């Protein structure tokens, strides 16, 4: 009897460790992805030369894996990952009708060539078009924006940095763990918004959709931070993730995405590197 009780205690302790917010969850998530984890993997090595974090949550059992917990809890400007929330609020308030909502380019020449044309909500999200997001935010207005950010629970909800740039190296801050919480509620359609708005934005985030794979994400970058956030459904299970890299000259969303995708491939949640995504 004592032996049985001891085994039950050990099992309970292991379950608590795996379900927590530490790197110890790696083994569980690798097994969930069908990976033979007999070879040890140090996920911190993917960040060599960078100060960054990667957070991955298995929505089937709510276990969360974290690389660099201190960084995962650090609030940072969301940069263009805020487009996800901005689009939700625009759709909720009627500022945007759907993914085809068109806005005309005003002729200003921007350093990013893709911005120098008319855009829909879909193409603006795909190209991180700041002017489109800024126009939407102005049309939403400070009162509605503040109220809905609070209702959604997005980061610190601080719009005091200016209605058309509070998310760009400014007052709005969100941590990688908060990004994962937000995206989990979006994926499960549990945000306090209408389902149509959530379904449209989920569709706009999609990077790849196949019978055995659904992959969605959004980059963001500012002066000293690069983001990549999203979710992946593989082998019938869904994982929500957020990655960022921070520091002088680290404002590179593409680099954050590359690191996140390398980790997801290592865990066999994405196909081999030869596969290209949108």
Image: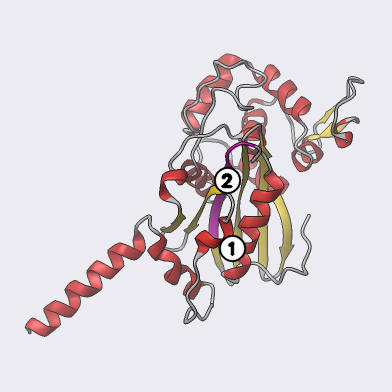
Which residue has dot 1 on it?
Answer: 263
Task: Check the image and tell me how it is coloured.
Answer: secondary structure
Numbered label attached to residue 244: 2
Quarter location, residue 24: bottom left
Residue appearing at x 67%, y 35% in the figure: 80
Q: Nearer the viewer, residue 97 or 171?
A: 171
Q: Which residues are magenta?
A: 239-248
Q: Where residue 192 sits in the image (x, y, percent)?
A: 50, 36
Going from N to C along the chain, the mark reached first, 1 or 2, is 2
The residue at 58%/60% (across/down) is: 46
Give the percent coordinates (x, y) of residue 273.
73, 68
> Vertically, is 44 above or below 107?
below
Query: Looking at the picture, how far across and down is residue 1, in whole percent?
Result: 7, 84
Q: Is residue 251 above or below residue 142?
A: below
Q: Residue at x 64, y 39 (%)?
A: 81
Give neighbour class at mark 2: few <14, some 14-19, many 20+ (Cα, 10 Å). many
Residue furthest to the left in view is 2
């Amino acid at each position: 009897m004592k032996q049985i009780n001891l085994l039950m205690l050990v099992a309970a302790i292991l379950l608590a460790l795996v379900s927590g917010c530490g790197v110890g969850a790696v083994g569980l998530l690798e097994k969930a992805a069908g990976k033979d984890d007999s070879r040890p993997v140090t996920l911190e090595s993917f960040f060599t030369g960078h100060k960054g974090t990667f957070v991955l949550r298995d929505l089937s059992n709510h276990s969360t894996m974290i690389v660099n917990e201190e960084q995962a809890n650090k609030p940072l400007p969301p940069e263009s990952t805020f487009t996800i929330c901005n689009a939700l609020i625009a759709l909720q308030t009627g500022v945007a009708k759907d993914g085809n909502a068109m806005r005309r380019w005003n002729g200003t020449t921007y350093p990013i060539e893709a911005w120098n044309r008319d855009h829909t909500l879909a193409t603006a999200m795909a190209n991180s078009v700041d002017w489109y997001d800024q126009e939407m935010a102005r049309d939403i207005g400070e009162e509605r924006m503040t109220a809905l950010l609070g209702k959604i629970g997005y980061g610190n909800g601080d719009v005091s940095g200016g209605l058309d740039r509070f998310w760009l190296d400014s007052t709005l801050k969100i941590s990688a763990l908060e990004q994962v919480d937000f995206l989990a509620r979006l994926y499960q359609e549990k945000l306090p918004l209408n389902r149509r708005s959530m379904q449209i934005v989920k569709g706009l985030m999609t990077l790849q959709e196949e019978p055995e794979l659904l992959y969605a994400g959004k980059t963001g970058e500012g002066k000293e931070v690069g983001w990549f956030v999203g979710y992946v459904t593989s082998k019938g299970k869904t994982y929500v993730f957020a990655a960022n890299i921070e520091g002088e000259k680290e404002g590179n969303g593409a680099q954050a995405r590359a690191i996140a995708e390398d980790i997801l491939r290592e865990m066999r949640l994405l196909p081999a590197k030869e596969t290209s995504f949108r």
